[in-house]
Image: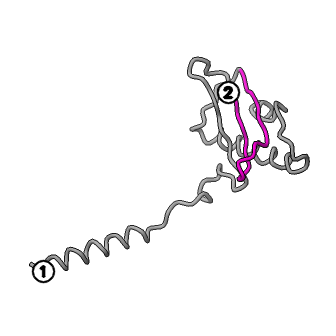
Amino acid sequence: MKYWLAIFALSLLSFNSFAQSEEQPSSASSKWISDKGYWVIESNINQPLQHLIRFYNNDDVLVYKEAVAGVKLNPAKRKVKMMLKTVLESSLLAWEKRRMPEENKNYVAAILK
């Protein structure tokens, strides 16, 4: 009985160490994820053509905010994610120069056209 219990315990330990050694997906594998910051889209289900997009740096500081109207954004699409990454990185560059958050400079609207 003790023999089977020892084998069972060793098999659980080896399974646990195997599960932890598997490589986790990194943010570098996703091209739309920036290592400099992140973005948040706020929208209302009753008004699908109006969005408020906020861009933050990695210190959770708001660097840019834009209200977009008349466009339906689907954040699940790769094209939208890449576009938002581009706007994020350009707004981070502008923020580093001024150290003040900007609003409604139409960065998102310009890139959507």
Dot 2: what SS?
Answer: strand
Callout in the foreground (2, 1): 1
Q: How crowded is mark 2: few (under 14 residues within 10 Å), some or many (20 or more)?
A: some
Q: Quadrant of residue 41?
A: top right
Query: What percent of the width, then of the height, locates residue 12?
Result: 27, 71
Badge 2 is on which residue? 51
In the image, what residue occupies the spot 84% across and 49% down?
93
In the image, what residue occupies the spot 31% across and 74% down?
13
Q: Residues within 10 Å of mark 1 (few under 14, many from 20)?
A: few
Image quarter (top left, top right, bottom left or bottom right) of the N terminus: bottom left
32 or 105: nearer the viewer: 105
The three-letter code of the residue at mark 2 reads: His
Query: What percent of the width, then of the height, locates residue 107?
Result: 81, 35
Residue furthest toward the left? 1
Magenta part of the protein: which range? 51-69
The answer to whether 10 is drawn above or below residue 90 in the figure is: below
Query: What percent of the width, then of the height, locates residue 83?
Result: 71, 41
Mark 2 touches mark 1? (CB < 8 Å): no
The answer to whether 79 is drawn above or below residue 71 in the figure is: below
Dot 1: what SS?
Answer: helix
Badge 1 is on which residue? 2
Residue furthest toward the bottom? 3
The answer to whether 103 is drawn above or below residue 21 in the figure is: above
- Sequence-first disc among 2 and 1: 1
Left or right: residue 28 compared with residue 59: left
Left or right: residue 37 compared with residue 1: right
Magenta stretch, overall SS: strand
47 or 2: nearer the viewer: 2
In the image, what residue occupies the spot 70% across and 34% down?
53
Q: Quadrant of residue 36?
A: bottom right
